[in-house]
Amino acid sequence: MNRELKRLSTVVLLMFVALFVSTTVIGVFQSDNLRNNPHNARTIYDSYSAERGPILVDGQPIAQSTPSNDAYNFQRVYSNPLLYSAVTGYYTLNQGNAGIEGALNQYLSGSSNNQFFDTINSILTGQTAKGAAVSLTIDPKVQQAAWDGLGDRAGAVVAIEPKTGAILAFVSKPAYDPNVLASHDTKSVIAAYKALDKDPAQPLQDRAIGGDLYHPGSVFKLVVASAAIDSGKYTPDSTFPNPSTLQLPQSNNFINNAEGGNCGGGDTVTLATALRLSCNIPFAELGSALGQDEIAKYAKAYGYSTPLSIPMSVTQSTYPTDMDAAQTMLSSFGQYDDRVTPLQVAMTSAAIANGGTAMMPTLIQKITSPDLSVIQPFQEKVFAQPISAATSATMTQLMINNVNNGAASNARISGVDVAGKTGTAQNGDGKPYTLWFTGFAPADNPEVAVAVVVENQTTFGNAVAAPIARSVIEAVLNK
C-alpha cells in the first residue's frame, strides 16, 4: 500500500513540476512572442485601450494614435501614408500587422518585458498606459528623393549609411494607404485588405526586402569580381578570351554581351574592362574558372542565404547550388536562378564602400519609453567582413571607372566621384527587363550606398535606374 502511495505521490509531484515549468515558460519566456502574435485577438483588442506609441522620422510622427469616440479609445493615424507605407506597415483589428507596426508591436503597445514597470506605474498612478516611441533612421529628404525618383514605376529603393548600417531611405512601389486598414469598421477593413491583396500590382508586397525576389543581372558581377580579386588569383588586369558569342557547355544555347559583339574589341579582355562595360561573356568565363563553391562562399559573406531583420524579417537572397557548368556560367552574371532583394544589393555596395566591412542594416535609431528614457539605443553592429580592405579599394576604383567611363555613366555627379554598377536582368524570352543600379558616394569617404530596382522595362539600367540613384545620392550630399 505504502509503495503504491509513493508511486502516486511521485506521479503527482512530476505532474506539478511539469505544470510549473510549462506555465513559467509560457508566462515568462514566451510572453513577448505570445503578445506579438498577430493572431492573438485578445492582445490586439487590449492594445487599443492604451495609447500606442508613435513611429517617428526626424522627430515627426509618421504613425500615431489619436483619441477616438468609440469603444477602442484610440485611432491609429498615418501621415504621408504612401511615402512611408513600406516602413510603417499597418496595424489592424483583424488582419494582423506588418512593417514596423508588426515587428515592434510589443514596444509600440507597451507590452514588452522591458516596459513592465511602466505598465505598473500607469496602474498605480491611474494614468493612461502608453507605448514606447520608435524613432527611425530614415532621412525624410532622402526618402522623398527615392520616392520621387521612382515616379509611377514599380520597384524599390534602399539607401544605407555604409559606416553604421543605418537605412536612410526605404521605398517600395506600388504603395498603399495604411489608414484604410486602421479603421475600426471591421467590414471596411476586410474589404480593403482583400482588394489590396488581390490587386495584380501587389501593393502589399514589400519589394525592398521580400515578395517575389529579383534576378540581379549585372549587379551580381560585383560579388564575382570581388571574389576573384580577393582570392588572390586574379587582378583587374587578368585577361579572358573575348568572343562575341559563347556556346554554353553541353548546350545548344549561346550567350552574348548586352551591347552585342565582343567586349571592347580585341582577342582578349581584362577583368577591369569587362566590369566597366558590363560584359557577360568574360564573367561567364571567370565564374566557370572560380567555381560555384567559391562564388557561393563570397555571396554568403555578403549576406546571401542569411536570416536578417531590420527589424522586419528579410527574405533571404539566394545563390543556387548543385549547378552544372552552363548554369554556373549563367549565374556568374546574375542570371539562371540568382535571386536578391534590393536590401542585399545595397548591403553589397555598402560593404565595398566601408573597406570590406558589412554593417548590420537597421531602421531603428532608438526606442524611447513615455518618460523619455531610452529602452533601446541605436545598435551599430558588424555583420561580416566579406572582402579585405585592399580588395575594397580595388573594387572602388573599378566602380568609379564604371561611372566615369563605362556603362553606369548616368550616375555621374559633377565634382563627386561616384562608384557604381548597373544591371539589366532578363526574365525570359519576350519578357521585359528588371533594371538595376547600385553604388556609393563620395567614393573616397562614402556617406551613402544605394540600390535601385525598376520592374518591367525595355531599356537598360543606365537609362532608368542610374538617374534615380543619382537623385538619392544628391539628396544625401546636399543635406
Image (tube, grey):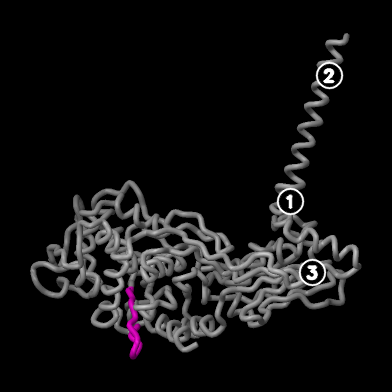
Circle 3: element type: loop
Q: How many marks?
A: 3
Q: Is residue 350 above or below residue 469?
A: above
Q: Residue furthest bottom?
A: 414
In the rendered view, tell whether residue 35 sits above or below residue 214: above
The front one of 124 and 428 is 124
**Badge 2: few (under 14), some or many (20 or more) residues near its Cα, within 10 Å?**
few
- Give the residue at x 23% y 66%: 280
Q: Quadrant of residue 285?
A: bottom left
**Left or right of 458 on screen, residue 168:** right
Q: Quadrant of residue 363?
A: bottom right
N-term-proximal mark, 3 vs 1:
1
Would residue 258 appear left or right of 245 to someone viewing this image? right
Residue at point 70%, 55% (across, down)? 37
Mark 1 and 2 residues: CB-CB less than 8 Å, in contact?
no
> x and y percent of residue 163 in the render?
45, 71
Type of amino acid under label 3: Lys
Q: Tell me which amino acid carries mark 2.
A: Leu
Instruction: Mark 1 or mark 2: name the one nearer the start of the chain.
Output: 2
Q: Residue at x 83, y 25 (%)?
A: 12
In the image, is residue 234 part of the stretch drawn in magenta?
A: no
Label 2: which residue?
A: 8
The percent coordinates of residue 267 (x first, y second) are 8, 68
Q: CA distance from mark 3 to mark 2?
A: 49 Å
Q: In this picture, which residue range is highlighted in magenta? A: 411-422
Secondary structure at numbered mark 2: helix
Question: Could you say which disc has been placed on residue 31 in the image?
Answer: 1
**Closest to the observer: 210 or 473?**
473
Image quarter where the N terminus lies is top right
Q: Which residue is mark 3?
A: 130
Dots 3, 2 in contact, CB < 8 A: no
Q: Label 1, label 2: how many angstroms apart (C-alpha)?
A: 33 Å
